[in-house]
Amino acid sequence: MDPDKKIDDLLSRWDVAHAPDPDLRRSVVQEIALRQRRAFDEAASDENSFVAWARALASRPMLSGMAAAVFVLVGMGLTRIGTHFVSPGEDELTLSYRLTIDPIYRVQAMAGASDRGPTAARSAEERFLVESLGWLQTELDLSPRQFERVSALHNSYESAFNSLFLKLLASYSRYGDLDRQRMSDDVIDYIAFYELLQEQERLKAMSSELTAELIEKVSQVVGPDQRERFRRLVQESYPSVPGPMDSRQEKQNA
Amino acid sequence: MLEREPETDRLLMIEVARGSVPALEILMQKWERPLFSFVYRYTQNEHATRDVVQETFVRLYTKREKYDAKYPLASWLFTIAANLCKNRARWRRRHPETSLELPSSDGRNEGRSMLDTYVAEETAPSGAMEGVEDLAALRDAVMTLPHDLRTTVLLHHYEGMAYKDIAEIVGCSARGVETRLYRARKILRKRLEAALRGEGATQKKSLSPLNSELPDSAAAWARTAG
């Protein structure tokens, strides 16, 4: 046999049996959290003060971002760390809060960030660092019990939001593929386009409904004044949500 | 071969850059198998492979600000994994007495795991001992390749990567990849022929000039061949 062919043949026969590592996800997240904590500890011990620690956090947005992610996973309560880093308008939702409760907005934000290139994405990232629930707690002056209930509500929607976001992402990606194919082959698969758009509409409608539902549920677990404030905050971004006037009406009716 | 979805990868990496662990999990699900296959063929040790794959994802996250969206994520992931493999091989050369890998009584399987043995048995044509020996000789020969040649061969043959992507990972030009493939094939051919003819003494002699750059179990191979 030709020696080169034999090598190719042997290389092709060299299979690797792979069983997915059931501990991979846990191990990776634990290791990230461990390094994160170590980095914080080192930064804190450098100058041995909270101010030094906060400065280190502010100067390393990646680390603070990761702290936020770890919180989401393990519920460590780190959300309160970063509230100083956002200065939204008085009646505006923070970007991070919108990202938390709105899969459609996440897709749009990603597209915008990627259109503007990595630098813009990084600068956008810095703005998203603040954990949304910490911000909400400050805005609405939630009591610990209210914060607990609001957090639980958001957590219960998190997986559905993530799932919808990923489905939307996949759908947009397929749309991009079809569009590229249309440009290169000059052939338009109308049915595929139509189905894809239908799917996107369905996902968006589902996403909007879920977001509205969460907002409504949050409104129900806070006090009347907090509800009014919350609705004022979300109204601009989500006009279909009952506004402060409606809220007052509800109060009167009650 | 890998199913390439660079745009999805890029979007997910933007999410990861924002600190999203769910996006990291999706990337882990997608890339665990290709990385495992590459690292396993490189190290030929299951424990080492699992460690390297895990560390690759940890670094993907902790170094995410260094990711350049101009390049496919695959290039960056395999660069991290290949560098970890190289570092591990260097560490093993410096600490030959400390090995977590399964020993064997005859030294033949040094640097090998039970998975490797199992795979060899599973993939060998039934009753074809010759085939098993050929495959074992090939794996040994791959282990004797220097880092850049080994990486190039594995990425080219198993991951189906384009020369320009391999060039990014290995740190050379596309033309350099071609040269490396040629050199790797030449070495593999030479060592396979020698091993299969049972020319241990000649083999050992011909290996010696390369010994300074041999990673992992190359020395073991030389001993075995002898």
Image (spheres, coloured by chain):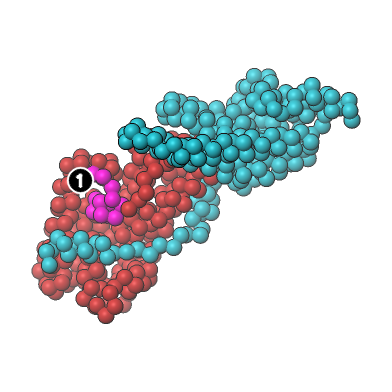
Say which element carries label 1: helix
Q: Type of residue at label 1?
A: Val
Q: x, y percentage for residue B108?
A: 27, 73
Q: Nearer the viewer, residue A164 or B194?
A: A164
**Residue at figure coordinates x 64%, y 34% from the top left:** A208
Q: Quadrant of residue A236?
A: top right
Q: x, y percentage for residue B8?
A: 43, 40
Q: Quadrant of residue A235?
A: top right
In the image, is residue B155 part of the stretch drawn in magenta?
Answer: yes
Q: Colour of chain B?
A: red
Q: Quadrant of residue B202?
A: bottom left
- Image position of A27 with respect to B196: above or below: above
- Visible in this render: residue A31? no
- Image position of A100 with respect to B146: above or below: above
Q: Which of the chains is cyan?
A: A
Q: x, y percentage for residue B89?
A: 30, 56
Q: x, y percentage for residue B75?
A: 33, 43
**Residue at figure coordinates x 49%, y 45% from the top left:** B24
Q: Magenta segment, which residues?
A: B151-163
Q: Is residue B55 left or right of residue A34?
A: left
Image quarter (top left, top right, bottom left or bottom right) of the N terminus of chain A: bottom left
Q: Nearer the viewer, residue B98 or B179?
A: B179
Q: Nearer the viewer, residue B145 or A161?
A: A161
Q: Which residue is mark 1?
A: B177
